Amino acid sequence: MFATSTQRHFWMFKDENDVSNARLSANIKYISSRGRNMTVAERETHFLNVVEEKSLIMSYEYQLRDFCRKFHPPMPRYVIGTALHYLKRFYVNNSVMDYPPKEILVTCVYLACKVEEFNVSMDQFVGNLKGDREKAAAIILNNELLLMQQLDYQLTVHNPFRPLEGLMIDMKTRFPTFSDPERLRPGIDEFLEQVFYTDAILIYSPSQISLAAIIHSASTSKENVDEYITKILFSEDQKRLLNLIEAVKKIRVMVRNVQLPHRDTIKALEKKLALCCNPDNNSESPAFKKRMKQSFDEEESFEDGQYPSASSNQVRNMLMGLSEMGKI
C-alpha cells in the first residue's frame, strides 16, 4: 500500500521548491568538487546551472518514453512509469554532469523491467539499442548497482494507473448517473502521460494524480464529476476534500506548464555537458575505458586460475554481484 510504502516515506517532497532545493544541492556539490580551482566566473561559464540541468533531464525523460514506445516486445505503461520514477529520483540527488544521463536512462528502464517482472533477457533488451550492443550490456550492468544504491534499494514504485482503475470501477458502480466513464479515457491517458514530465509524481500521491486526471478529462470534455467527488468520495470528510481540490489545481497547473525545451537549446546544453561531465563516469572517456579494461583483464586472469590482488578481489566480487543480479 502506498500509505506505508518507502515511496511515501522517503521519495515524496513537500512541494516544488523542496524538489528544486534538492537538485540545487546536487548541482552545487558537483561544481564545488570539480571546480574548486576555478574562479566564480569560470564556474558559471564552464558548468551547467540547475535550470540547464532540469532542461536536460526533461529531454532525457522524453527520450526514455520514445525508447520504451519502440521497445519490442511492447512495454506496459507501468514499466515506463517506474523507469521514469527511477530517472527522476536519481537526478534529484545527483547532477547530470556527474553521471551520463544516456547511460543512466537505459539502466533505469532495464531495472524497471526486472522490478515490474516484465521479463526480457539482456540480449533482448540491448537488441532494442543502436550501436555496440555488447558494450551497452556492459555499461548497463556496470551502472545497475550504482542506480540501486542511489535509490537506496527502495525499488517499489506506486504508479497512478492502479488507483485510476479503482476509481473508474467505483464511478461505474456508485455514480450510475454518469453514463460510460470510459469515454473519459483518452483525456485521462493524455494527462497521465504528461504528468510524468513534471515533479508532481515526487510531490502528490498516485490516487491524487489519478483523480486529477479524471477531473481534467471531464473538464476538457465539458462533463461534470463534481457530484461524484463531493457527495460520494468525500461526503463525510470536508478537510480531505479541500486538500484534494488544492492538490488537483496544482497538479493541473504543473501539467499545463509542461514544455519541452527547443531542440537547438538541448544541442547547446549537450555540448556544454560534454565539456564539464565527470570523466571517471563517462564511458567515452580514456579514464573510464582504462578502468573497464583493467576490470576485464583481472576477470580473465581470475578465470585462468591466477591469484588476484586485493584490489582484483574487489573487482571480482563486484562483477560476480552484477552477474548474479542479471539473472534476477
Image: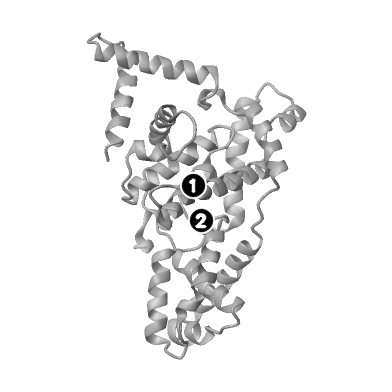
**Horizontal relation, residue 176 to residue 48: left or right:** left
Q: Which mark is residue 202?
A: 2
The x and y percentages for residue 304 are 24, 11
Q: Amino acid at mark 1?
A: Arg
Q: Residue 229's spot in the image, x, y percent? A: 49, 82
SS category of the residue bearing label 1: helix
Q: Residue at image x 53%, y 26%?
A: 282
Q: Quadrant of the C terminus?
A: top left
Eyeballing the image, is 170 above or below 67?
Answer: below
The residue that disc 1 covers is 89
The tag on residue 190 is none
Residue density around tag 1, few if under 14, some if 14–19, many if 20 or more, within 10 Å: some
Relative to 30, does residue 261 appear above or below in the rendering?
below
Determine the residue positioned at 64% across, 58% down: 258
Circle 2 SS class:
helix
Display coloring: one colour
Q: Quadrant of residue 324?
A: top left
Q: Is residue 133 above or below residue 105?
A: above
The front one of 93 and 75 is 75
Could you tell which of marks 1 and 2 lies nearer the N-terminus?
A: 1
Instruction: Please tell me in which quadrant of the rendered image residue 163 appears.
Output: bottom left
